[in-house]
Every structure is written in C-alpha cells, then in structure tokens.
Amino acid sequence: MLRKAITLSLLAVAALIAPLMAACSTETEPTAIPIIATVEPKPNVSVTAAWARPAAMIAYQADADSMAMSGDKEDSPMMDMDSDSTTMGDMDAMPMMGPKGGTGAVYFVLTNDGDADDTLVEIIDIMIEYPSDFSDIVELHQTLMNDGVMKMEKLPSGIPVPAGESVELKPGGLHVMILDIKRSLNPGDEVSLVLRFASGVEQKVTAEVRQP
C-alpha cells in the first residue's frame, strides 16, 4: 500500500514538472541584431587640362640702380610681391620687372567624383627640371574686378572642390601664382607641381607651357 502511494506521488510530481520542461524547451533564442558597417564619405579629386602661361625672367638690377639714384625706389609703382592683393591681375604672359623677378601662372580643372567635399590647400613643390631651379614662392590666387580695376587676391584658405562638382582654374579667375621665378617659361616647357588637399591626398601634375 505504501509502495502504491509513493508511486502515485512520483507520478503527480512528474505531471507537474513535465509542462515546465516543455515550456523551457520551446523558448526561442533571442534574435541577433546584424551589425551594419558604416562607410565614411571620401573625396576623389582628379586634375586635368593643366597648362601654364609663358613668363619672362627679366633682370631688374639696372632699373633698381637708376631708381635708387633718383630716390624713387620706395615709391616705385612696381608690383608688391609680398602683398595679398595686387592690381596687376594674372597677366603672366607679359614680362614683369621687380626686385623679385618675374611671375607665372598655372591653370587646370579639379573634378571631385567622390561623395565628400575637399579643398586644394597649397602647392608644396614646383619645378621645371630640378626642384631648386624655378621658384620657391607659389600661391593660390583669384582675380577679381573691383571698381573697374582688376585685382589679384591670395586665397589663404585654399580652393574648395565640392563633392560631385568641377572647379576650373583659368585666366581672369582662380589660378596658381608663381612668384620670383628664376628662369623664363617658354612654350613647350613642362612645369611639374605637387598639389596638397585638405583630405591629405597629394597629387603630382605636369602642365605644358603654351600661349593662351
């Protein structure tokens, strides 16, 4: 009789536990959340159609001496190469005389095929044949008309190149200004430049000298 009572008790306990075990076995595992990798937008700027104006290196010494003797050296209307703004424009095909030699200009088209903006911030190297044979002063400029006078302004913040757009450097507008040239630029010469962008990218460009 006792054995029968124990057996019934065990069966009753088993009947209570069975549903609990079934419920545990049917619980679904938590759904994994997929990790989506984010791609950072990047610029992709190409440089095309590069060319440079002819420019003459003119000896200044004789005129400097004559002005010094006349006492007009400080009042000379010559172009101030250290100024951020001049009234000469980018007329680089015309020989210029001054204490820092002649000037030249380079033009090209910047095209940003990327999905982020970029900016041309500086020219870090320029040469014809050797790094030291041409100029140590290269700046980004724009030419503007102000009260009927053509002015050239330095662009200390660089030239923006928005994503999906092209920016043309051309005579009478944006351009690379070369100051204190140590030798003339003649048609057929090739000028090499290294452009640095805000993204950190550096690009070497070769511009052929030709008449506008």
Image (spheres, rainbow, N blue to C red):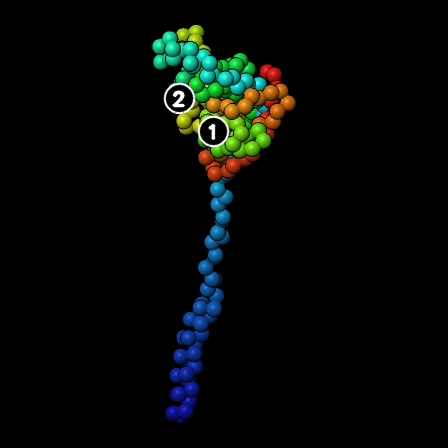
**Element type at marker 1?**
loop
Of mark 2 and mark 1, the one earlier in the sequence is: 2
The residue shown at (35%, 10%) is: 71
Up-down relation of residue 110 to residue 89 (above or below): below
Q: Residue at x 39, y 88 (%)?
A: 5
Residue hosting label 2: 82
Residue 192: horizontal and vertical position, in percent?
57, 30
- Hey, what amino acid is under mark 2? Asp
Circle on res. 136: 1
Front in this rendered view, residue 40 or 111: 111
Residue 125 against residue 96 in the figure, above or below: below
Q: Mark 1: which amino acid? A: Asp
Pick the front one: 166 or 23: 166
Horizontal and vertical percent for residue 106? 54, 23
Residue 124 numbered mark, or none: none
Crowd rating for badge 2 (residues with CA inside 10 Å; few <14, some 14–19, many 20+)? few
